[in-house]
Image (cartoon, rainbow, N blue to C red):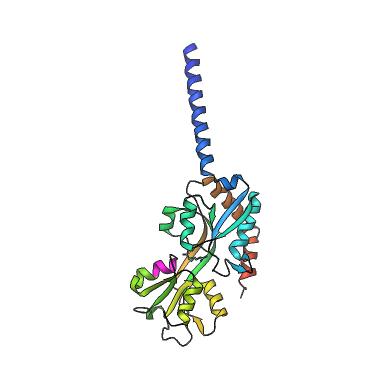
Amino acid sequence: MKNLKKILAIVLAAVFVFALAACGSKEEAQSLTIEEGKLIMATNATFPPYEYYDGDDIIGIDAEIAKLIADKLGLELEIEDVEFDSIIPGVQSNKYDIGMAGMTVTDERKEMVSFSDSYAKGVQVVIVKEDSAIASIDDLEGKKIGVQQATTGDIYASDDYGEENVTKYANGNLAVEGLKSGKVDCVIIDNEPAKAYVAANEGLKILDTAYAEEDYAISLNKSNTDLQKKVNDALKELIADGSVQKIIDKYISAK
Ligand code: ARG
């Protein structure tokens, strides 16, 4: 009987130590900035209506949804504007708590980061000059294609039409400049930014045929399952109470 008590005490102590260790490692996964009450979001603010500048402020669908999520988590949102292809590495190294940039969920990216539930849909489309000979995506073979570096537009175009035919620009604006000046014959990019670029520039149009359909989600560090759960819970509430749709409608005129 005495022995049994001893064994029980040892087992309990071991369980306690294990539990402590588990807590410790969880703490490590949590970023320091969150402990300081901040939620750091990395984005690439050349992507209207999801993220773009209004004076010195970054506004747009992602910025507004992120603000509501941060509010629900009791954190102060801080947005960092970085190159699109440094968002995922920065989330992996815990430099940023979340990446939110009209970012498409892909299997390759899922190997590097985890994603929240999806909050919006995107479609890859093709922008051409109004008088272009390119009438549909069937005409893209051998054409010069402009894309934003490391986006799904880049990945698909490089796979389908060959890296040698794809010019990679730092952002969508520059790709559109390349199209206007005749350096490329078309630009493959997400539909909503495409509409915004076409509205802001004379003589461009979007082909009717969509290239690929995608889901946008928030990227998170794989080990930060706690934050992923909190973000998903917040997102669920914001979708259920219509807040997300309200923000999307504000930036994308419902037709
Ligand atoms: N949806 C595309 C992707 O995930 C393009 C996103 C570009 N976003 C941006 N903020 N520049 O690859």
- The residue most toward the bottom is 131
Residue at position x 38%, y 73% in the image: 166
Residue at position x 54%, y 44% in the image: 30
In the picture, the quarter occupied by the C terminus is: bottom right
Q: Quadrant of residue 144?
A: bottom left
**Residue 189 can be seen, yes or no:** yes
- The residue most toward the top is 2
Which sits in the foreground, 30 or 242? 30
Which sits in the foreground, 36 or 153? 36
Tell me, yes or no, whether the highlighted magenta stretch contains residue 154: yes
Q: Main secondary structure of the magenta part?
A: helix
Q: Please give the range of residues in magenta.
A: 151-156
Rendered location of residue 37, percent (x, y): 63, 47
- The residue most toward the front is 56
Residue at position x 66%, y 53% in the image: 71
Rendered location of residue 94, percent (x, y): 50, 49
Which sits in the foreground, 27 or 78? 78
Measured along the vertical axis of the image, is residue 6 above or below residue 110? above
Rendered location of residue 164, percent (x, y): 33, 73
Measured along the vertical axis of the image, is residue 56 above or below residue 131? above
Residue at position x 61%, y 52% in the image: 234
**Residue 162 can be seen, yes or no:** no
From the viewer's perspective, tell me whether residue 21 is left or right of residue 242.
left
Rendered location of residue 57, percent (x, y): 63, 65
